[in-house]
Image: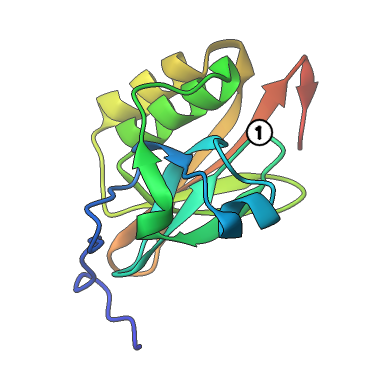
Amino acid sequence: MARFPGTEQQHNRAGWQPGQVVRCRRSRANAARELSDVRGFVLEVRPGHARLLLNLQGQTIWLEGEALLAESELTDPGLERFRQAYVLLAGQRLELDDQSWTVFSAGFSASALDQARSALGEFAGDLELEAHGVSEFAVRMSWCHGGVTNA
């Protein structure tokens, strides 16, 4: 499917939204992947699937929307801080590489960037704001985890 800037809608038939906390259902398929009861949060959605971030090591997975259950909170405080920053930045997708993580968004206020930096707390490293194409912003971040910067 072609991407046209500014025309994409972030929706999912099961109702999942980026930033929402979820748990993988107990099912044979999730058990075979060792994902039963694993919590994470939604990074990106497509009509029938959702991409989850499961931990701060960058483990992501695409799952069918029906394979997930809503949860109220994450058990990992570091992942919860990153989720809060992702929500404040109105994140719609995430790209990971060895040097940094990049959150893509259609837009957010300057105060949201400051609040995201605050939410990350001691995990915050450098946050760089870039225009990405015509209708997206990219926030590239190197962040500290356990006192070690990943950049």
- Residue annotated with mark 1: 56
Q: Quadrant of residue 67?
A: bottom left
Q: Quadrant of residue 100?
A: top right
- In front of the other: 79 or 92: 79
Q: Is residue 16 above or below residue 76?
A: below
- Spot occupied by residue 90 in the image (x, y as percentages of width and height): 30, 42
- Left or right of residue 48: residue 62: right
- In front of the other: 21 or 67: 67
Residue visible at 52% across and 61% down in the picture: 62
- Left or right of residue 82: residue 16: left
Colour convention of the picture: rainbow
Residue visible at 41% across and 36% down in the picture: 86
- Spot occupied by residue 83 in the image (x, y as percentages of width and height): 44, 31
Amino acid type at circle 1 is Leu
Image quarter (top left, top right, bottom left or bottom right) of the C terminus: top right
Under tag 1, what secondary structure?
Answer: loop
Residue visible at 55% across and 15% down in the picture: 77
